[in-house]
Amino acid sequence: MSVEEPVTELEAAQALTPEEESTLRKAILESGWDQGCFLTDDEAGLAVAPREWIEGCADRSKSEDIGDGADPHPHGLPHADPSADEGWIVITQRCDLLRELRREPLVELARCRLVKGDPLGEAGKNSPRFLLVHRDGKKGWIADLRERIFVPKTRIRDWPPPKQALTDDAGSRADFAMRLGRRYSRKPLPTRYVETVQRPLKEIIEADFVSETAPFTDWLLLDRPGDMPQLIVLIHDDANFNAAEDTAHKILSALEEKFAEHAGTEIIVRRRSEIYLAEFLDAYPVDLYEITQTALVKAKKAEALGEDPPGGAGHSKPSV
């Protein structure tokens, strides 16, 4: 009597009928699996070799269409705190989670953990490595893009109901996706702007404007051939817009006064949720993270002492 060899996870996926695959994809659609959902280490399971799965599923038959195009979760699932201090967060987009196995057989995960202090502050700023998932006072969950794995999409059948770890805010979720893409699309600031823009800005801000820049999350530079560059300052959505705009223009005035070649440079202020994706991707990031992080620390100390955060450091109500 012959003993059958155990079926591997890939072989089981290859053996799925088109109808069974459609059932899997419908379950993903209806349950709400999406970018930002949290998994514990045990739930995620071991990573697999992407090429083996991509090649192993490439010749699968086309599965049936799912649904009528209507998404039962058009705004995503509501936020739920992760069930562990460390685990994984789904970074695959929902549209790819719903695609056929022959095109997208895997789910990409990034390490997610509960932190406080500097890592949380960095994730809330312009870090290309750490993304803010959800903040809860002085602690919060971040995604660490330096640690990523792939797991088979077929495992979703055995996963518990999805828990959406991202904050209940469309702007925050869009910002997460935008920064995730920026991990690979950010452009290095040309040397000419390092010398003529980044260093002068650091010098001016460190001298006179550190506290006032606490609500600033990003400095972006749009290169405009034949014209002066445009600086875009992004601020926290709940920051005092008028105060931030006033600070930005004071910094620009100081820049023009000290460096005459900057006369005519334009600066605009936008809330993080209001930046256009095309602008964000086209712009060069100006690295002022260390300064803004220092400003955030000072703002937190002022808040702890019962003083007003300088420049409406992410805590004041938006001004109209």
Image: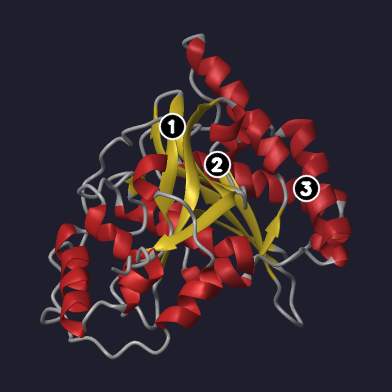
Identify the mark nearer the N-term, 3 or 1: 1
Q: How far, Cα to Cα, is label 3 from label 2? A: 22 Å
Q: Nearer the viewer, residue 230 or 263?
A: 230
Element under label 1?
strand
Element under label 2?
helix
Q: Position of residue 65 (x, y in %)?
A: 18, 85
Q: Amino acid at mark 2?
A: Ala
Q: Nearer the viewer, residue 258 or 234?
A: 234
Identify the residue at image location x=74%, y=81%. Answer: 225
Mark yes or no: residue 240 visible: yes
Camera-side mark, 3 or 2: 2
Residue count near mark 1 (Cα–Cα under 10 Å), binned few <14, some 14–19, many ≥20:
many
52 lies above or below 213: below
Identify the residue at image location x=70%, y=77%. Answer: 224
Q: Position of residue 53 (x, y in %)?
A: 46, 73
Disc 1: which residue: 140
Mark carried by residue 220: none
Disc 3: which residue: 201
Q: Quadrant of the N terminus?
A: bottom left
Disc 2: which residue: 123
Q: Amino acid at mark 1?
A: Gly
Q: Nearer the viewer, residue 249 or 24?
A: 24
Identify the residue at image location x=22%, y=64%. Answer: 28
Q: Amino acid at mark 3?
A: Leu
From the viewer's perspective, tell me whether residue 140 is left or right of residue 213. Answer: left
